[in-house]
Amino acid sequence: MAKKQVSNEHIKFAVLATDVALFTIKEDELYVRVINVNRPPHFVNVPGLPGGLLAPDETAEEAIERLLEDKALMTSPLHLEQLYTFTKIDRDPRGRVVAVAYLALVPWDNLSEKEKTNSNEVKWVRVADAKKLAYDHDEILDVAVKRLRSRISYTTVISRLLPREFTLTELKAAYEAILQTALDKRNFRKKFLKMDVLNPLEKERSGTPWRPAQLYEFKDRKVKEIEVL
Amino acid sequence: MAKKQVSNEHIKFAVLATDVALFTIKEDELYVRVINVNRPPHFVNVPGLPGGLLAPDETAEEAIERLLEDKALMTSPLHLEQLYTFTKIDRDPRGRVVAVAYLALVPWDNLSEKEKTNSNEVKWVRVADAKKLAYDHDEILDVAVKRLRSRISYTTVISRLLPREFTLTELKAAYEAILQTALDKRNFRKKFLKMDVLNPLEKERSGTPWRPAQLYEFKDRKVKEIEVL
DNA sequence: AAAATAGTGTCTATAAGACATTATGTC
DNA sequence: GACATAATGTCTTATAGACACTATTTT
């Protein structure tokens, strides 16, 4: 039980920040957007998740859109969902900062050239390579990856990482990139098609030097619950 | 996309609060702890969830323990898990307040007489009767109930609402109180016992004017994942 | 023996998971 | 026709859900 005495509750202000774990899938691998953090003496050119402080007249979602634009040059529409709020006292060595962390997803194919680019300031890195991040961002990223794994298993959020039209092989590859396990092709197709969330299109994926595959789209643009995958 | 210009990010302070939806099960019904909110002119003696502002040197969990003791006279150990952070600009009519909401569970049988009592200031009310709460607490309670329903279906959190020793009938009644649906006795027992998370005890529930029932306890005090119920 | 709950089993339908071959397009 | 991926089906085992009666204790 906490027994702290606080004299005047009206002076209890806290600095409120938001951080985003923004994912995409590129070449069948899961990538996360990281920026360069340069805040001597604690962080000198180390990678970190994009984030920053909330303005008094912003919701967390609005702040994220602003911060992603400012710090990560991202302006494409995103799928955003709240992840967790980190309240440890010493998570920022500069002082008390509470962070409302978000999970964001974007399809690689929708990005502009600028958004795809890597620079010193901001880059896409494989999730497996995103280590030793500033602040408590290793922990935030870890929570985000776990949440993403869990969410794709009982919702259609995966749709937010894919282009509008995709083949079943591409869909399966996206699951495998996130879950980091191989799935059986026959069982995957059988199960996914039975869920009745996909529309087959009147086209096929062309331009491949082999047999073209049927294209599908999600029937519903909204993320919905599905049977456990 | 947000396009707001903010002159100096170091003055972006926000008031940070925490609110708790504290549940218990009493007489086979789900109850929530509410306090009296009297903050004229906006809220005059209306019910609300216990909560308050974070001190600069507290985590959200510590603040909740302090606030529950101060405002709701609750000192028993609780199961606490973070629910959601509410960041709407106008959720508090007195100004910008961001609330980190928590879900808390406590077994009725563990409570002291003082903790069980209802007064003008603080009381246990049936969840179905907890309406028209102050601030956005209707929304917080709604999210909390949905989360609780979801969590009992794939974890053993229900253990945090039960006394250490309980019968299968009592366990089923707890599920029914939360899910608000009748469960089949035979299927429930079969399924729960197969999960292998319960220990049968060498005792029975005595004092009933009918056939005594076998007592069980959870093998593990920790909340763990189970098959979907 | 009456009352009240405790405790149990079977059947059917559906889902999960293991597993290999044929089909169809490009070059 | 060589190559590379697309597409498909069966079998086994496990789980979900519907459903009703007997057992045991108290009074």
Image: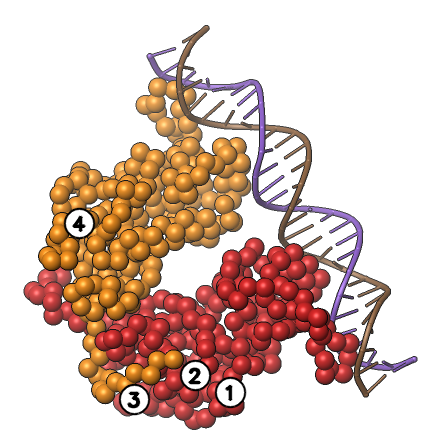
Chain colours: A red, B orange, C brown, D purple
- Gap in angstroms between the C-alphas marked 2 and 3: 25 Å
In the rendered structure, are the residues bearing label 2 and label 1 in contact, judged by CB atoms less than 8 Å apart? yes
In the picture of the structure, the residue carrying the numbered disc 3 is A39
Residue for point 35% across, 50% down: B145
- Gap in angstroms between the C-alphas marked 2 and 4: 43 Å
Label 1: chain letter = A
- Secondary structure category for the residue under label 3: strand
- The image quadrant where one finds the C terminus of chain A is bottom right
Q: Residue furthest bottom?
A: A120
Same subunit, tags 1 and 4: no
Under mark 4, the amino acid is Val
When the figure is inspected, residue B55 is found, relative to residue B112, above or below; the finding is below
Q: Residue furthest left?
A: A7
Q: Is residue B110 left or right of residue A140?
A: left
When the figure is inspected, residue A21 is found, relative to residue A121, above or below; the finding is above
In the picture of the structure, the residue carrying the numbered disc 2 is A75
- Gap in angstroms between the C-alphas marked 3 and 1: 29 Å
- Gap in angstroms between the C-alphas marked 2 and 1: 9 Å
- Secondary structure category for the residue under label 2: loop
